[in-house]
Amino acid sequence: MAGRPLPGGGGVCAAAYPNTSAGFPPHLQAGAMRRRFWGVFNCLCAGAFGALAAASAKLAFGREVNVGFCVLGIIMMATTNSLMWTFFSRGLSLSMSSAIASVTVTFSNILNSAFLGFVLYGECQEVLWWGGVFLILCGLTLIHRELPPPRKPLPHKQR
């Protein structure tokens, strides 16, 4: 049965399976871009809430802290930490991959921690530190950009 041809022209044609993937219709492309935007937005919010949680923990457990500030800092730390995990899980579900979500949250957390450290504690970061942040930003732009279309295979030389 394997050696017999299929009746009625039922053979498989190479043109039926092109090498390029089928493009999405415009309404699905718009939905994918919206989903990607909300994934990035949730990851950026998660990083900001993580930085707020760290800053409130530093306020709560500082050396010379009033008991009221300590309690307020612990409550704020628990609240912002739970918000961070909520936004991070939403960002994970909306992102294209977990690596993209994790790097975006890390970048947002580092940047917001530097800002809060400067505003709340007067901490300044070194130039080398900002160079590292710039390299992380370069990596983020590489992983967030759209993947290039697949190249057509080069024709093989025939002997």
Image (cartoon, helix red, strand yellow):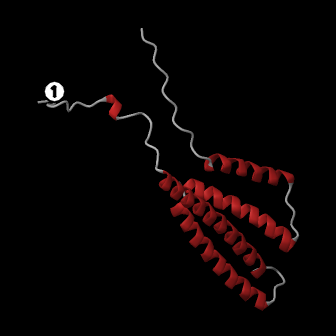
Viewer-nearest residue: 45 or 54: 45
The residue under label 1 is: 5
Judging depth in this view, the residue of 157 and 92 nearest the camera is 157
Instruction: Residue 112: give x, y in percent of width and height.
Output: 75, 66
User: Residue furthest toward the bottom?
Assistant: 68
Q: Residue furthest front?
A: 26
At x 85%, y 59%, the residue is 125
Q: Is residue 159 above or below residue 107?
A: above
Residue sitting at x 62%, y 60% = 40
- Residue 14 falls left or right of residue 133: left
Secondary structure of the residue carrying tag 1 is: loop
Drawn side of residue 131 relative to residue 88, left or right: right
Residue 47 against residue 147 in the figure, above or below:
below
- In the rendered image, the quadrant that contains the N terminus is top left
Residue 103 sits in which quadrant? bottom right
Q: Position of residue 76 (x, y in %)?
A: 69, 82
Closer to the camera in the image, 126 or 49: 49
Q: Nearer the viewer, residue 5 or 24?
A: 24
Q: Position of residue 52 (x, y in %)?
A: 72, 73
| Callout count | 1
Assess disc 1: are there few (<14), some (14-19) or many (≥20) residues with their C-alpha within 10 Å of its C-alpha: few
**In the image as oriented, which residue stretches furthest toward the top?**
159
Which of the 4 image quarters holds residue 65?
Answer: bottom right
> Residue 21 at what x, y percent from top left?
44, 40
- In the rendered structure, which amino acid carries the disc numbered 1? Pro
**Residue at 69% across / 74% down in the picture?**
53
Residue 51 located left or right of residue 37: right
Q: Quadrant of the C terminus?
A: top left
Give the residue drawn at x 74%, y 78%: 56
